[in-house]
Image (cartoon, rainbow, N blue to C red):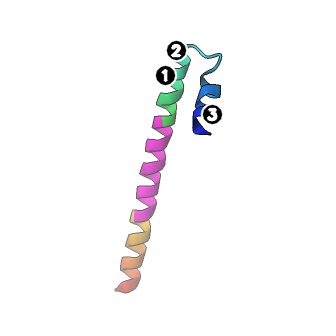
């Protein structure tokens, strides 16, 4: 299924557009990871304060 989605996404795009799309998806993934790490850190701090 994923291969079909990728082939559809690639269809009718130039090489530069494909590269830009993959870079954007990597950027969004890294941003999501950073946000989730910050959220986990905040939750751990809250739990630590409640435990004291």
The secondary structure making up most of the magenta span is: helix
Which mark's residue is nearer the viewer, 3 or 1?
3
Q: Which residue in the structure is indicated by mark 1?
A: 19
Q: Which residue in the structure is indicated by mark 2?
A: 15
Nearer to me, 9 or 39: 9
**Residue 5 - label:** 3
> Is there a contact, CB below 8 Å, between mark 2 and mark 1?
yes
Disc 3 from disc 1: Cα separation: 16 Å
18 up-or-down from 30: above or below: above
Q: Quadrant of residue 14?
A: top right
Q: Quadrant of residue 51?
A: bottom left
Q: Does dot 1 land on a helix, a strand or a loop?
A: helix
Q: Does dot 3 land on a helix, a strand or a loop?
A: helix
Disc 3 from disc 2: Cα separation: 17 Å
36 up-or-down from 20: above or below: below
Q: Which residues are magenta?
A: 26-40
Q: Is the residue marked by circle 1 packed among few (<14), some (14-19), or many (20+) residues within 10 Å?
A: few
For marks 3 and 1 on the same chain, the one whose residue lies earlier in the sequence? 3
13 up-or-down from 36: above or below: above
Disc 2 from disc 1: Cα separation: 6 Å
Q: Residue at x 38, y 79 (%)?
A: 49
Q: Residue at x 65, y 16 (%)?
A: 12
Q: Is residue 38 left or right of residue 8?
A: left
Nearer to me, 28 or 18: 18
Q: Does dot 2 land on a helix, a strand or a loop?
A: helix
Q: Residue at x 41, y 77 (%)?
A: 47
Q: Is residue 6 left or right of residue 49?
A: right
37 up-or-down from 11: above or below: below
Q: Is the residue marked by circle 3 packed among few (<14), some (14-19), or many (20+) residues within 10 Å?
A: few
Residue 39, image x, y percentages: 46, 61
């Amino acid at each position: 299924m994923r291969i079909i989605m990728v082939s559809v996404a690639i269809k009718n795009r130039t090489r530069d557009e494909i590269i830009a799309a993959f870079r954007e998806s990597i950027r969004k993934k890294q941003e999501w990871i950073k946000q989730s790490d910050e959220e986990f850190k905040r939750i751990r701090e809250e739990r630590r304060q409640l435990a004291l």
